[in-house]
Amino acid sequence: MITSKQRAKLRSMAVNEPTIMQIGKGGLGENLIKTVSDALEARELIKLAVLETCEETPRSAADALSEATGAEVVAVTGRKIVLYRESEKHKKIEI
């Protein structure tokens, strides 16, 4: 669990991060969850976009991804999701 100060720091870092994935009409399949998990291991902090065609709301998609990958939801702003999970092998971010 991260504190509100840590969450604020991660949110400020995420502003400059590119959106690396999109969740569309395919929803949250096994492939997407695996890809998100791999991206979290490599980057620790990732930003995703939830397209209009997705059946889930951005908040429910963020919660489901968080639960499936063991990540923390840093922010859900509009249709963007920011997730954080400390990397086991490639630690880059100190919070």
Image (tube, rainbow, N blue to C red):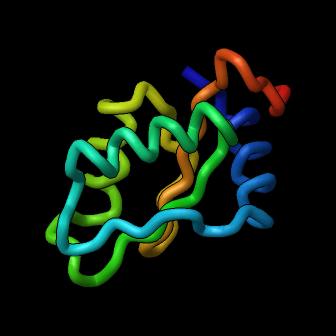
The answer to whether 86 is drawn above or below residue 59 in the figure is above
Which of these two is toward me, 54 or 58? 54
The answer to whether 53 is drawn above or below residue 49 in the figure is below
Q: Residue at x 27, y 42 (%)?
A: 64
Residue lying furthest bottom: 52
Q: Position of residue 44 (x, y in %)?
A: 66, 37
Residue lying furthest left: 55
Give the quadrant of residue 7.
top right
Quadrant where the N terminus is found in the figure? top right
Q: Residue at x 37, y 70 (%)?
A: 50
Which of these two is toward me, 34 or 22? 34
Q: Residue at x 70, y 52 (%)?
A: 11
Quadrant where the C terminus is found in the figure? top right
The answer to whether 75 is drawn above or below residue 92 in the figure is below
Give the quadrant of residue 24.
bottom left
- Relative placement, left or right, of 23 versus 14 is left
Q: Position of residue 22 (x, y in %)?
A: 42, 69
Q: Position of residue 42 (x, y in %)?
A: 66, 37
- Relative placement, left or right, of 50 versus 26 is right
Give the quadrant of residue 49.
bottom left
Q: How many marks?
A: 0
- Relative placement, left or right, of 19 versus 95 is left
Q: Position of residue 73 (x, y in %)?
A: 49, 42
Which of these two is toward me, 44 or 67? 44
- Relative placement, left or right, of 90 versus 61 is right
The answer to whether 94 is drawn above or below residue 9 in the figure is above
Q: Residue at x 46, y 74 (%)?
A: 78
